[in-house]
Amino acid sequence: MMMRFFRAFALLMLAGMLTACGYNDFQRLDEASNSAWSEVLNQYQRRADLIDNLVATVKGEANFEQETLTKVIEARAKASSIQLTPELLGNPQALQQFQAAQGELSGALSRLMVTVERYPDLKANKAFADLRVALEGAENRIAVARGRYIDAVREYNVLVRSFPSNLTAKVFDYSAKPNFTVANEAAITSPPKVDFSTQ
């Protein structure tokens, strides 16, 4: 009788340990972060596809500044050439390289939009206006997708670092995933300089 009690107790303890180990949580959260990353890539690809149409429309403007257009084309090519699969997400350098390329593309697009202000015919072009709105929507979708990815990675990383699931992480070689970072943290920590003096 006593032996049956010890076996039942041992089985109960083993079941409790397996439940608390978090293995299934690792599977769920890993899949969630990979899925969120796929959505980030999907939105970046949507933006890249819009850029092709935007460039074609801008090329129709006879006197448009070619240097600005060339920088957008080069930045798009560079951003599109970096493929960051879920398997490579564990590599902080690969994520940083991907972020840098996407940042360059965003910067080139911003300069293009500022330059367009000097071309009234282009600003009045309906196709360009539609593309501009679609591009703004794509940027918003990218921000939302990145936010969801950041949340998914945060939840996964908390599991990796929490006890007792951190023991499971060590046994099954689960490590914390790198997350998006701000390109220039020093710039955002200092307040902007405002000068209202007249020149």
Image: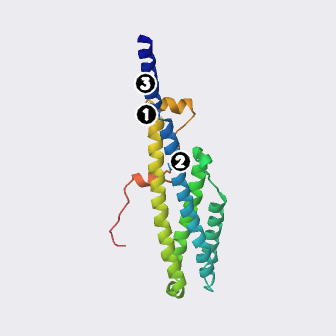
Q: Can residue 154 be seen in this view?
A: yes
- Which is more N-terminal, label 2 or label 1? 2
The label on residue 12 is 3
Q: How far apart are marks 1 and 2 (CA)?
A: 19 Å
Left-right relation of 82 to 147: right
- Secondary element under disc 3, as helix, strand or loop, is helix
Quadrant, the C terminus: bottom left
The label on residue 162 is 1
| x and y, in percent, of residue 100 in the image | 57, 56
Q: Which residue is drawn at 62% across and 73% down?
A: 52
**How many C-alpha atoms fall within 10 Å of the one at disc 1: few (<14), some, or many (≥20)?**
few
**Residue holding disc 2:** 31
Image height check: is 93 above or below 46? Answer: above
Image height check: is 129 above or below 12? Answer: below
Q: Which amino acid does label 1 sit on?
A: Ser
**How many C-alpha atoms fall within 10 Å of the one at disc 3: few (<14), some, or many (≥20)?**
few
